[in-house]
Image: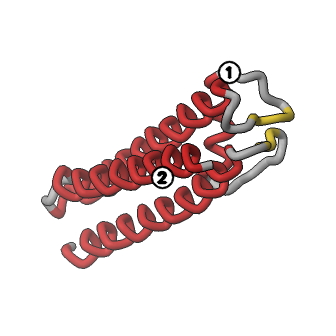
Amino acid sequence: MFTTTILVSLLVASVVLIHYEALYRLSLLMPIEARMHRYKILAGVLGALCAHVIEIWLFALGYYFMVNAEAFGTLTGNFNYALLDCVYFSFTVYSTLGLGDIEPAGPIRFLVALEGLTGIMLITWTASFMFVEIQNVWTSK
């Protein structure tokens, strides 16, 4: 369990740092001119979506490593140990959709729980970021 805790902690910390850097870079790169406001919002939304997809893939790689190492538990149900199955599962957990067609068993459940919590926090962080950016665009017009 100690190894699982360290691995999951490093994974979550990496994802949070990636998200921070993505939002920080987006705030610097988004066009500033008032007449470019549509492009500013579009760049923010697409950039944030790209960041979320990268983070989901990072979690998926964590699942892939853990289920193939067999010491961390497994995923059961509609799952055949392929990387894309891990990506699909990661999307459902990160977004807290949780379809239930794949279920974790063993210590991997710790990663599943923390991915759901991390995902919802990062999604709300993105929503707050976009709210502030849109508010800045609309008040500068």
Q: Give the left or right position of residue 120, taking residue 128 as reference.
A: right
Q: Are marks 1 and 2 in contact (CB under 8 Å)?
A: no
> Looking at the image, is mark 1 or mark 2 nearer the viewer?
2
**Rendering coords of residue 74 (x, y %):** 75, 35
Picture quadrant of residue 117: bottom right
**Label 2, on which residue?**
9
Identify the image quadrant of residue 4: top right
Label 1 secondary element? loop
Residue tagged 1: 82
User: In the figure, is residue 123 to the left or right of 99?
Assistant: left
Counting other residues with Cα less than 10 Å from the Cα at mark 2, is it few (<14), some (14-19), or many (20 or more)?
some
Residue sitting nearer the eye, 35 or 50: 50
Whole-Å distance between the Cαs marked 1 and 2? 24 Å
Q: Element under label 2?
A: helix
Q: Could you tell me residue 92's position as x and y percent? A: 68, 46
Type of amino acid under label 2: Ser
Whichever of labels 1 and 2 marks the residue nearer the N terminus, that label is 2
Q: Position of residue 49 (x, y in %)?
A: 44, 46
